[in-house]
Image (cartoon, rainbow, N blue to C red):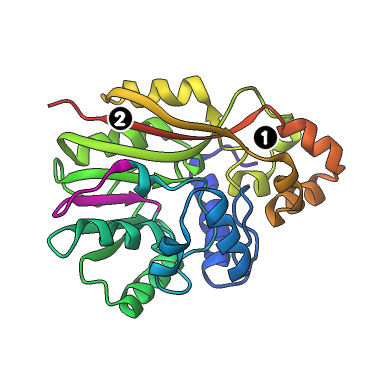
Amino acid sequence: MPKDQDEIRKSVREGYAKIATGHSSCCAPSISCCGNTNYAQEAGLAIGYSEEELKSVPEGANLGLGCGNPVALVSLKLGEIVVDLGSGAGFDCFLAANEVGHSGHIIGVDMTPEMIDKARGNARKGNYRNVEFRLGEIEHLPVADNSADVVLSNCVINLSPDKLQVFKEAFRVLKPGGRMMVSDIVLLKDLPEKIKNSVSAYVGCLSGAMMKIAYLAAIAEAGFEDVRIASDTSIGVELMQIDPTGQAIQKELNMRPEEFAQAINHTVRSIKVNAIKPL
């Protein structure tokens, strides 16, 4: 895996550009397959979305890329301004838009032009007038200081080579008293070296994941208070083994399913964390 931050971003951008344009069916290490609508639906149900939520967004918005449902946990209010870090095809943005109403506003930020194009197309299909998508890196958000009520992110911050900077940016754009709710992948112990150095494992939200304690510490270091874990669950080994991304990683590294299961079991966690920017 390239160690240079620009090289890491390039690898991630290329991987997700393929997903956006339909040239790849592998996404994240959840039960997901971006090229298969039924599979994405199953993935959504498994990680906390309701059937009603899945049906409420434009077709093609749900790519099965998440590891949780941050919108369900943040209790959005009418009129709020929300920023989604790594908005992809717009799935969580559209759910949030339904919560904040016409008086609210949603800003999705993604660094992949192909994803931005796809999200904007989905917004047009769904006639969402309170949602916009901006091209940019989550380490350098194209959003004004103290302008958002809520920052969301779903299984994206683990892809950043500078997670502390991401949390500092989230802190910067939030109004005093603003809330952050993120779903993400973290680790309880080190992964084997060959997984840590795998490009597929990084793009698949696995090898770029941070230790859980360090992740929570970075949120606090960025200035947030009341940092709390709302949910902490394991990534199912059986599902990882049959997931297209899990299979791609195993194939690239020539790992047997049992070896792969042993490497990730009791190691990879999906957490939902909320925090507050102090008044």
- Return the x and y of residue 223 as percentages of the image width and height: 26, 24
Q: Name the residue under label 1.
A: 196
Q: Is 264 displayed left or right of 7 in the figure?
A: right
Q: Which of 161 and 240 is in front in this view?
A: 240
Residue 122 in the image: above or below residue 52: below
Q: In which quarter of the image is the N terminus?
A: top right
Q: Residue at x 67, y 35 (%)?
A: 196
Q: Mark 2 points at which residue?
A: 275
Q: Which amino acid does label 1 sit on?
A: Lys
Crowd around label 2: few <14 · some 14–19 · many ≥20 (10 Å): many
Element under disc 2: strand
Q: Is 213 displayed left or right of 241 in the figure?
A: left
Q: Which residue is drawn at 40% across and 32% down?
A: 273
Element under disc 1: helix
Q: What span is colored magenta in the figure?
A: 74-86
Q: Quadrant of the C terminus?
A: top left
Is residue 82 magenta-colored?
yes
Residue 10 in the image: above or below residue 182: below
Distance from Cα at disc 2 to Cα at disc 1: 29 Å
